[in-house]
Image (tube, grey):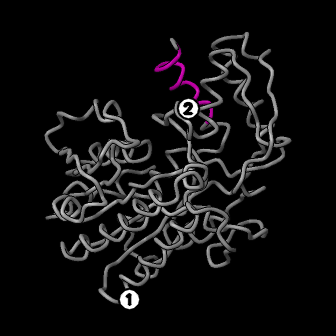
């Protein structure tokens, strides 16, 4: 990724909501490296303070502990900023099925608060985390931005409503927005613990403990697993693109390739067994399919390539090798 293309950020002030989370903290770190002034808004419901530890004392970094469900907190954080990267949300399809009200409050009411705060603060651009769950029951592959199905979970509904609100705020108030439909993002700092841990960090942790991971279904469900550095590139492109046609759009943020869960576990074994050969012998088990899951997910990234010059740098093998290395160095003692 050529940082020269992002030079304008060195004189910019950027708010990252959910900045203590997996994706948000990686964005904060990259923006600081590029010379930007960074404000992080987080209530630490799912974010972690240790994700910020490397730059908490950085002179260009400010942490605001607050909640996007509070309009006052949103307005305080947005005051005087040039750009907003809105990452704050309650992720996880199962979480939304178990507690749809809280997911709705955070992901829709909180999103609306941030849009209002962005509008009132006169920010130049509002870039937000959308989701591949928006494609719902559409069976078409690859997924193309303008063809979606009906949502399959409360979480998917909240993320689709975000796109509708962003579109209305542009048309009604002139706020420039870009939505990034994330596809199964993974990488350093992603939490392997908790009931709603994503599949890759959860399986990595289980393999490191010589515990058998459980695949939901027969292992043929496939995903467009996307390494964090590809996601960072898309966010930076969304912040800095000078192409007016690229604004007020949604983009798949992915690789454009898919891997099924059987293949995923084999790759994880391969890379982890370089550190601990016994992991190669750990058995993988199977359980029932999970409610709200779509069978296959594969993105077309042609729109992002055409309008914003996106070029994913990490295929799944490269990303998994990097992620496994990070987990082993940081959590290998578990």
Q: Residue at x 30, y 62 (%)?
A: 84
Q: Residue at x 72, y 15 (%)?
A: 279
x then y, percent, for residue 39 = 22, 51
Picture quadrant where residue 203 is located: top right
Mark nearer the N terminus (1 vs 2):
1
Tag on residue 143?
A: none
x then y, percent, for residue 208 = 63, 17
x then y, percent, for residue 301 = 62, 64
Question: Is 327 situated left or right of 261 in this image?
Answer: left
Tag on residue 323?
A: 2
Q: Residue at x 63, y 15 (%)?
A: 209
Q: Main secondary structure of the magenta part?
A: helix
In the image, 193 versus 96, the foreground residue is 96
Asked whether the residues under the numbered discs 1 and 2 touch, taking CB atoms below 8 Å apart as contact, a structural biologist would say no
The span shown in magenta is 320-332
Query: What secondary structure is marked by label 1?
Result: helix
- In the rendered view, would you say 149 is above or below 64? below
Mark whose residue sits in front, 1 or 2: 1
Counting other residues with Cα less than 10 Å from the Cα at mark 1, is it few (<14), some (14-19), or many (20 or more)?
A: few
Q: Residue at x 30, y 68 (%)?
A: 113
310 in the magenta segment: no
Counting other residues with Cα less than 10 Å from the Cα at mark 2, is it few (<14), some (14-19), or many (20 or more)?
A: many
327 in the magenta segment: yes
- In the rendered view, would you say 225 is above or below 189? below
| Residue named by callout 1 | 171
């Amino acid at each position: 990724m050529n940082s020269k293309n992002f030079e304008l950020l060195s004189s910019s002030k950027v708010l990252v909501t959910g900045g203590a989370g997996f994706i948000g903290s990686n964005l904060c770190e990259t923006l600081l490296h590029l010379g930007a002034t960074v404000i992080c808004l987080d209530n630490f419901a799912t974010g972690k303070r240790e994700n910020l530890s490397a730059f908490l004392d950085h002179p260009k970094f400010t942490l605001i502990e607050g909640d996007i469900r509070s309009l006052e907190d949103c307005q305080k954080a947005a005051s005087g900023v040039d750009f907003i990267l809105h990452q704050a949300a309650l992720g996880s399809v199962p979480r939304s099925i178990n507690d749809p009200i809280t997911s709705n409050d955070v992901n829709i009411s909180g999103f609306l608060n941030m849009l209002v705060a962005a509008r009132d603060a006169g920010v130049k651009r509002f870039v937000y985390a959308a989701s591949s769950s928006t494609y719902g029951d559409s069976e078409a592959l690859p997924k193309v931005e303008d063809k979606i199905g009906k949502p399959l979970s409360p979480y998917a509904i909240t993320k689709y409503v975000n796109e509708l609100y962003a579109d209305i705020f542009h048309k009604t108030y002139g706020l420039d927005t870009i939505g990034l439909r994330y596809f199964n993002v993974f990488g350093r700092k992603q939490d392997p613990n908790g009931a709603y841990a994503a599949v890759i960090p959860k399986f990595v942790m289980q393999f490191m403990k010589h515990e058998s991971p459980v695949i939901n279904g027969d292992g043929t469900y496939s995903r467009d697993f996307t390494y964090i550095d590809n996601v960072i590139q898309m966010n930076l492109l969304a912040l800095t693109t000078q192409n007016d046609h690229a604004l007020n759009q949604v983009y798949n943020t992915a690789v454009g390739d898919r891997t099924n869960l059987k293949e995923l576990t084999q790759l994880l074994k391969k890379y982890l067994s370089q550190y601990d050969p016994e992991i190669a012998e750990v058995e993988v088990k199977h359980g029932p399919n999970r409610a709200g899951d779509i069978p296959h997910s594969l993105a077309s990234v042609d729109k992002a390539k055409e309008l914003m010059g996106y070029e994913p740098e990490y295929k799944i093998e490269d990303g998994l090798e990097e992620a496994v290395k990070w987990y082993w160095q940081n959590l290998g003692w578990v």
